[in-house]
Amino acid sequence: MIVLNLLCRHQHRFEGWFASAEAFGDQQERGLVTCPVCNNAEVSRLPSGPRVISSSAAKDAAEHESVAAVQAQLRDAIKAYVRESENVGPRFPNEARKIHYKEAPARNIRGIATLEETRDLLDEGIVVVPLMVPPSEETH
Ligand SMILES: [Zn+2]
């Protein structure tokens, strides 16, 4: 079992688990390797070397059904989160801080924060999860 670092056409990085590099090449050619974020099938390998997974880790993965199923679950979870959270846009760092210090009602929010702002929030002990949301999810 190997883990490859992959990149889709929309610059989403993700990991793919394959039986071998040949298995990846074969699945890629048939368009079976898709980005977990945007479902794009134009996937390329990043130059970093593949990681070899020990048999016990491979077994763990097998117990979590197929990787594709896990990726689909993740995608659904992100969609549900986006649907249920309030979009505060660029006010995100402020709102996250207000909620953390109980100056605003506790709720799920999403929005835009720079890398630096995200780092500051994490430094203050505020849990921030970076999500890559396909643009299409934002429009409807
Ligand atoms: Zn993508």
Image (cartoon, grey):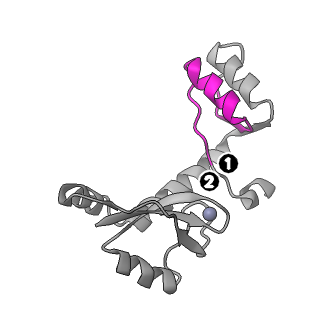
Query: Which quarter of the rendered image does ligand 1 occupy?
Result: bottom right
Q: What is the spatial separation of the Cα atoms under label 1 and label 2, in whole angstroms?
A: 6 Å
Instruction: Give the percent coordinates (x, y) of residue 122.
Output: 57, 25
Element class at badge 2 = helix
Name which residue lies at 65% across and 69% down.
9
Question: What type is the residue that disc 1 sits on?
Answer: Arg
How packed mark 1 is, by other alpha carbons closer than 10 Å (few <14, some 14-19, many 20 or more), is few
- Image quadrant occupied by the C terminus: bottom right
| In the depicted structure, whether residue 26 falls above or below residue 62 | below
Instruction: Give the percent coordinates (x, y) of residue 116.
Output: 68, 30
Residue hosting label 2 = 79
How packed mark 2 is, by other alpha carbons closer than 10 Å (few <14, some 14-19, many 20 or more), is some
The stretch in magenta equals 107-131
Image marks 1 and 2: residues in contact by CB distance under 8 Å: yes
Q: Is residue 99 magenta?
A: no
| In the depicted structure, whether residue 115 falls above or below residue 5 | above
Instruction: Give the percent coordinates (x, y) of residue 97.
Output: 68, 20
Q: Is residue 108 left or right of residue 92?
A: left
Residue hosting label 1 = 83
| In the depicted structure, whether residue 72 falls above or below residue 115 | below
Quadrant assignment, res 67: bottom left
- Image quadrant occupied by the N terminus: bottom left
